[in-house]
Amino acid sequence: MLVYVDIEHPKVFKDKKKREDHFTRIMDAKLKFEELSSLPCYVLHFLRIKSFSQKISQPHALLISGNSTDWSEYNFEWFNDINENISLKLLQTLLMRKNKLNSPW
């Protein structure tokens, strides 16, 4: 499984045109990732990652979207959950792969 983390600012979802354009881009990317990898791709907005962390255990890859909103408009505390969960998922994934491959690192 792939996990595609959408980091777009929530304000984008309040404008109908921006929301539709954004969801179109996200779905296009999701479908392309699935085509290229032959794996299912789960899309998750970064503000909801904590509530879904159990469903995305040990992904094959974590993909992070881009964003159109200026970084000055973000509250960086919003990224605490994503930072914690992604760091943990990457560590779990690396450890799982190491054990499966029996690699020395």
Image (cartoon, helix red, strand yellow):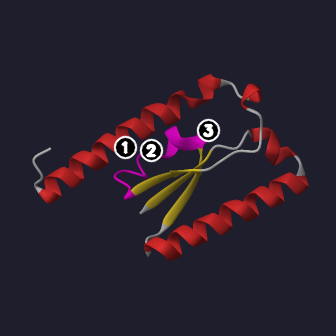
Tag 1: amino acid = Lys
The magenta segment is: 46-60
Q: CA distance from mark 2 to mark 1?
A: 9 Å
The residue to which callout 1 is attached is 89
Callout 3 amino acid: Leu
Checking the image for residue 71, the label placed there is none
Helix, strand or loop for disc 3: helix
Which of the 4 quarters of the picture holds residue 17?
bottom right
Q: Which residue is mark 2?
A: 53
Numbered disc 2: secondary structure: loop
Q: Position of residue 33 (x, y in %)?
A: 53, 68
Q: Label 3 belongs to which residue?
A: 47
Closest to the observer: 8 or 16? 8
Q: Are marks 2 and 1 in contact (CB under 8 Å)?
A: yes
**Alpha-carbon span between mark 1 and mark 3:** 16 Å
Is 37 displayed left or right of 21 in the figure?
Answer: left
Q: Residue at x 22, y 46 (%)?
A: 95
Q: Is residue 72 above or below residue 57?
A: above
